[in-house]
Image (cartoon, rainbow, N blue to C red):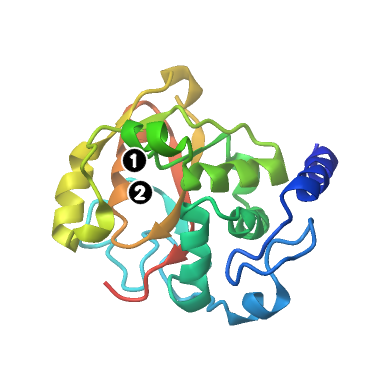
């Protein structure tokens, strides 16, 4: 299956030459990022809590609905540029780069074989009408390409059309996220299963938390969260 994806990437490159998601320079069809920009990425300190996904653990002070959370880089510098490029659908290489790292990390933590389905944090219906694109789901699909675990973008929906996370304080994020996401899939698709929930960034964890709550209420046994980046400070 992965060889087919590589062939499709090669064909696509003939018409839409591949570009680095950070500097926008041309790169080979099978590369995700140029060598210079990859060296500029600031990888997260491995001391962050793998339960809540935060640099400063909140497990004892918050109700955490997900069971584990992993991130790779800080949302800063080259990492921030790569995320913005992914959000704007300019280049999907960032999703591909960290999808490979995600599969490797999950294997190392003996979690990959437990995962039954992959999904992502949803965007609003309005944004989907405008762009027909969900950057978090692109990350989920790239992980699927590297492990062949089923992926679905129809398990969750964003019911609060006005929720724009980066414009809110930490407390506002928490209050709004609690009501913003709901389960809209078929319960048999998650009941008793382990779900991998993907997003681009974890800040307070509120979005992942309440998406996980919706999945758990629908019958999911475990939810493992995976994001490309984390914010340094909150």
Say which quadrant the N terminus sits in: top right
Which x, y percent locates residue 20? 65, 65
The residue lying toward the viewer, choosing from 163 and 188, is 163
Residue that label 1 marks: 211
The residue lying toward the viewer, choosing from 158 and 88, is 88
Callouts 1 and 2 close, C-beta under 8 Å: yes
| Figure check: 18 above or below 1 | below
| Figure check: 102 above or below 130 | below
The residue lying toward the viewer, choosing from 118 and 131, is 131
Cα distance between the residues tagged 1 and 2: 5 Å
Specify whether 52 is left or right of 178: right
Say which quadrant the C terminus sits in: bottom left
Q: Residue at x 28, y 43 (%)?
A: 210
Which x, y percent locates residue 95? 59, 54
Which x, y percent locates residue 163? 22, 45
Q: Residue at x 18, y 58 (%)?
A: 168
- Tell me if mark 2 has few (under 14), some (14-19) or many (20+) residues whose alpha carbon lies within 10 angstroms of its own: many
- Tell me if mark 1 has few (under 14), some (14-19) or many (20+) residues whose alpha carbon lies within 10 angstroms of its own: many
- Total marks shown come to 2
For residue 93, the mark is none
Find numbered disc 2 in the image and state the secondary structure of the residue it sits on: helix
Q: Residue at x 49, y 32 (%)?
A: 153
Specify whether 141 is left or right of 136: right
Q: Residue at x 47, y 27 (%)?
A: 190
| Figure check: 143 above or below 205 | above
Tell me the quarter of the picture where residue 125 sits: top left
Tell me the quarter of the picture where residue 232 sits: bottom left
Residue that label 2 marks: 208
């Amino acid at each position: 299956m992965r060889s087919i994806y590589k062939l499709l990437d090669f064909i696509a490159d003939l018409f839409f030459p591949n570009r680095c998601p950070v500097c926008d320079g041309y790169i080979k069809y099978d590369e995700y990022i140029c060598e210079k920009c990859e060296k500029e990425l600031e990888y997260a300190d491995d001391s962050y809590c793998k339960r809540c996904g935060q640099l400063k653990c909140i497990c004892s002070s918050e109700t955490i609905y997900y069971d584990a959370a992993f991130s790779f880089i800080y949302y800063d510098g080259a990492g921030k540029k790569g995320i913005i490029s992914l959000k704007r659908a300019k280049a999907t290489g960032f999703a591909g780069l960290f999808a490979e790292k995600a599969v490797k990390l999950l294997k190392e933590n003996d979690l990959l074989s437990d995962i039954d389905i992959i999904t992502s944090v949803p965007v609003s219906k309005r944004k989907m009408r405008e762009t027909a694109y969900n950057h978090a789901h692109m990350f989920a699909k790239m992980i699927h390409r590297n492990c062949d675990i089923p992926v679905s973008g129809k398990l969750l929906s964003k019911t609060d059309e006005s929720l724009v996370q980066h414009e809110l304080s930490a407390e506002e994020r928490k209050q709004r996220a609690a009501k913003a996401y709901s389960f809209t899939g078929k319960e048999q698709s998650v009941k008793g299963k382990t779900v991998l929930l993907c997003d681009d960034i974890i800040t307070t964890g509120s979005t992942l938390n309440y998406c996980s709550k919706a999945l758990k209420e629908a019958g999911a046994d475990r939810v493992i969260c995976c994001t490309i980046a984390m914010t340094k400070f909150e």
